[in-house]
Amino acid sequence: MSDNTSTFKRRLSQIKDILTVNRTATTIPFDPNATKFPTRKELPEIQGAPPGAAWVWGENDFVGRLNLLTPTRVKAASAEIKTGDIVPLNLPLNVPETPAFHREKFQHTIKTLREGVAFDDVSRDNPPSGTQWDGFRHFAHMSSQTFYNNTKAADIIGPHANEKCSIHHWSNHGVAGRGVLLDYRSWASKKGIHYDPFERHEISYDELYQCGKDQGIDIRPQAQGGDIMIGDLLFIRSGFNEAYKTKSLEERMKAATRDSNISAEAPMQWSGVLQEDKILDWLHDSYFAAVAGDAPAFEAWPSQKGLSLY
């Protein structure tokens, strides 16, 4: 019966596509060039995957939603350039000077190749010092200890380690597209919402919606009547860097070296987006190619909900 139901739904989608000039992704692997994708609640179950997993780009896929950065979408994004100004999004490699979650400090030395003539830089870093992407092998679905597309710890370390879902696949693909910045920090200040980004402060979907509205952006997906387009790159500014610059070296070090266990009562705390269904639905249904923030953790840390947005 379920197979018949799936076939009926697929044919119904095909008829709707003809009438609306859409291309709906109905079968796995999804076509990145599709113009309509399933919502989080419509995701098909994937055998062997954790509940709610969006492993929809094929079993040999290593880039996830970066697949949505198609030539058509990247070209369309370039048409929105107004001034051509360049805005660096990366922090210096030694900021924070003491990384959170007990990571190693950035180390930099200069090597002399020939006195007075030639020099090399030698550096060693352990994110989150500076600015970095969290790749698919960074944080697993905790209860199943499974990473994206059924990647396991044995794929990452040990005698059978391999390049499955290694972040170099992202580098080979490249990241270029239309960015959407939600300046939550400025909106919150404007509304009299005061908080320390070095403490746990939850940013809800409803607040982000109002923040976007204040900026003239409807943050709903285009499929729901909003301004967010498939393949957009989301940036949320919570004010970490602004607060970092106001704190003393001692205060920054004390905050970065707090106990970072993953319990709800962990002393290490950071502001970020709230772990709630509205956020999960929005992040999924908008089909962002990637999301980023200015804090050590994109989500409010530690989670109080028994789940992590990782």
Image (spheres, rainbow, N blue to C red):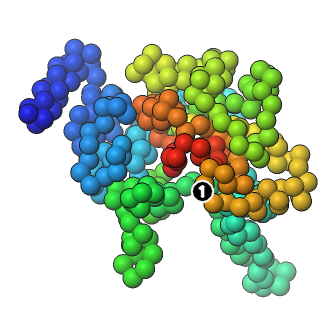
**Badge 1: residue crowd in 10 Å (few <14, some 14–19, many ≥20):** some
**Which residue appears at 70% of the width and 47% of the height?**
270
Measuring from the top left, give residue 75's x and y in whole percent.
Answer: 46, 34
63 or 279, nearer to the observer: 279
Residue 222 visible to the viewer: yes
Number of on-image labels: 1
Give the farthest residue toward the front.
Answer: 265
Asked if residue 247 is positioned above or below residue 202 in the image, the reply reads below
Residue 23 placement: quadrant: top left
Asked if residue 307 is positioned above or below residue 112 in the image, the reply reads above
Residue 7 visible to the viewer: no
The residue pinned by badge 1 equals: 262
| Drawn side of residue 29 relative to residue 4, left or right | right
Picture quarter with the N terminus: top left
**Which residue appears at 47% of the width and 61% of the height?**
137
- Callout 1: SS: loop
70 or 68, nearer to the observer: 68
Give the farthest residue toward the bottom.
Answer: 114
Measuring from the top left, give residue 22's x and y in whole percent.
Answer: 28, 23
Measuring from the top left, give residue 267's x and y in whole percent.
Answer: 72, 54
Residue type beneath disc 1: Ile
**Which residue appears at 26% of the width and 39% of the height?**
44
**Which residue appears at 38% of the width and 59% of the height?**
144
Measuring from the top left, give residue 308's x and y in whole percent.
Answer: 52, 47
Asked if residue 92 is positioned above or below residue 271 in the image, the reply reads below
